[in-house]
Amino acid sequence: MDRTARREDEVRAWAERRGCSLRVLNDEHHWLFQQPGFIAEW
């Protein structure tokens, strides 16, 4: 989990460059990439 948490800023920047928002929930266990009409869960 520490490695994943350290990557959150990098992943958020990647998502924003592609027009997505990133929501990180459930103590960093659930990540949502969102665009209008599209949601990808990790």
Image: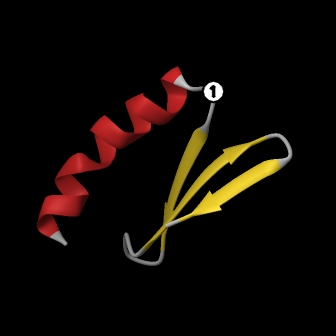
| Residue at image coords 83%, 40% | 36
Would you say 22 lies left or right of 14 here? right
Asked if 25 appears above or below 19 in the picture, the reply is below
Percent across and percent down for residue 19 are 63, 26
Specify whether 25 is left or right of 21. Answer: left
Q: In the visual, does 22 lie left or right of 8?
A: right
Q: Is residue 15 above or below residue 8?
A: above
Disc 1, SS: loop
Residue found at the far right of this picture = 37
Please report the residue visible at 13 percent of the width from the left and 61 percent of the height from the top.
Answer: 3
The residue located at (13%, 66%) in the rendering is 2
Residue under numbered circle 1: 19
Front one among 39 and 26: 39
Q: Position of residue 30 (x, y in %)?
A: 48, 72
Colour scheme employed for the rendering of this structure? secondary structure
Which residue is pictured at 42% across the width and 38% down the height? 12
Q: Mark 1 Cα within 10 Å, few/some/many (few <14, many 20+)?
A: few
Which quarter of the picture shows residue 18?
top right
Residue placed furthest toward the top: 17
Q: Is residue 40 above or below residue 15?
A: below
Measuring from the top left, give residue 24's x and y in whole percent.
47, 60
Where does the N terminus fall, quadrant-wise?
Answer: bottom left
- Total number of numbered discs in the rendering: 1
Identified by mark 1, the residue type is Gly
